[in-house]
């Protein structure tokens, strides 16, 4: 009967060491990071298109709310931002607390141009929407400034009848970028986003 030797080498186990696993995890994490950044790094034209489409969807939503609630909505356009308003208690109130229709700031360097019924409208940054009343020196000067800053000046009206007035074209653009996009609203409530041919 042959003797068994206790010193025989055990069968070698196949697998990864902890160090090898850590190296693989680090490599996968780096690749994932670069892939994510590549996906998120939209071109300037993509950013312009995305913002234009966002505005179209928000206007459509506000128009649907106006119809459902039987209330009048409006849009106030600035050079680099816009906000939605609702007519309540004989005045236009901004929907500042609304998570969807709240004020929208455009990405850096992006600006808006607006035409109402084929007439080019000059729009200023929100910070420049002031009147001489801001600079009156009296006991209520601070209160006047606050009231004037929040005073709504809508240019486009979304009616409870489903109509938009006046008809408009809003162009999204970035200086130095050839491509730009228009959001167009028609009196019958139809909306369209298209690339500028300029």
Image: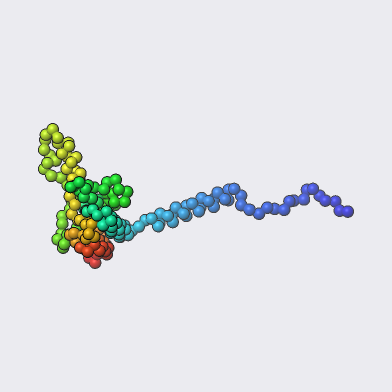
The quarter in which the C terminus is drawn is bottom left
Of residues 155 and 68, the one nearer the viewer is: 68
Classify residue 116 as left or right of residue 64: left
Please state the total of marks drawn on the protein image.
0
Q: Residue furthest top?
A: 139
> Residue 153, position in %: x, y?
17, 50
Q: Residue at x 30, y 48 (%)?
A: 98
Q: Residue furthest bottom?
A: 197
- Decide if residue 19 is in sight here: yes
- Decide if residue 174 is in sight here: no
Q: Residue at x 19, y 40 (%)?
A: 146
Q: Quadrant of residue 115?
A: bottom left
Q: Residue at x 70, y 53 (%)?
A: 12
Of residues 165 and 160, the one nearer the viewer is: 160
Q: Residue at x 44, y 56 (%)?
A: 35
Of residues 137 and 68, the one nearer the viewer is: 68
> Residue 104, position in %: x, y?
27, 50
Classify residue 44 as left or right of residue 151: right
Q: How is the image coloured?
A: rainbow
Q: Quadrant of residue 196?
A: bottom left
> Residue 165, position in %: x, y?
18, 59
> Residue 105, position in %: x, y?
27, 50
Classify residue 95 as left or right of residue 123: right
Tell me: residue 142, above or below residue 94.
above
């Amino acid at each position: 009967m042959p003797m068994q030797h206790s010193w025989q080498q055990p069968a070698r186990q196949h697998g990864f060491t902890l160090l090898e696993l850590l190296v693989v995890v680090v490599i996968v994490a780096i690749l994932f990071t670069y892939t994510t950044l590549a996906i998120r790094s939209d071109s300037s034209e993509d950013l312009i298109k995305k913002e234009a489409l966002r505005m179209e969807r928000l206007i459509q939503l506000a128009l649907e709310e106006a119809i459902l609630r039987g209330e009048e909505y409006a849009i106030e356009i600035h050079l680099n931002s816009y906000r939605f308003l609702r007519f309540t208690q004989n005045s236009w109130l901004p929907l500042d607390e609304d998570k969807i229709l709240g004020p929208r700031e455009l990405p850096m360097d992006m600006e808006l141009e607006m035409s109402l019924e084929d007439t080019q409208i000059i729009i200023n940054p929100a910070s420049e929407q002031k009147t001489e009343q801001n600079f009156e020196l009296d006991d209520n000067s601070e209160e006047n400034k606050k009231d004037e800053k929040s005073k709504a000046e809508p240019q486009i009206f979304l009616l409870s009848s489903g109509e938009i007035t006046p008809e408009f074209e809003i162009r999204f653009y970035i200086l130095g970028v050839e491509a730009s996009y228009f959001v167009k609203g028609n009196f019958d409530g139809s909306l369209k986003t298209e690339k500028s041919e300029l």
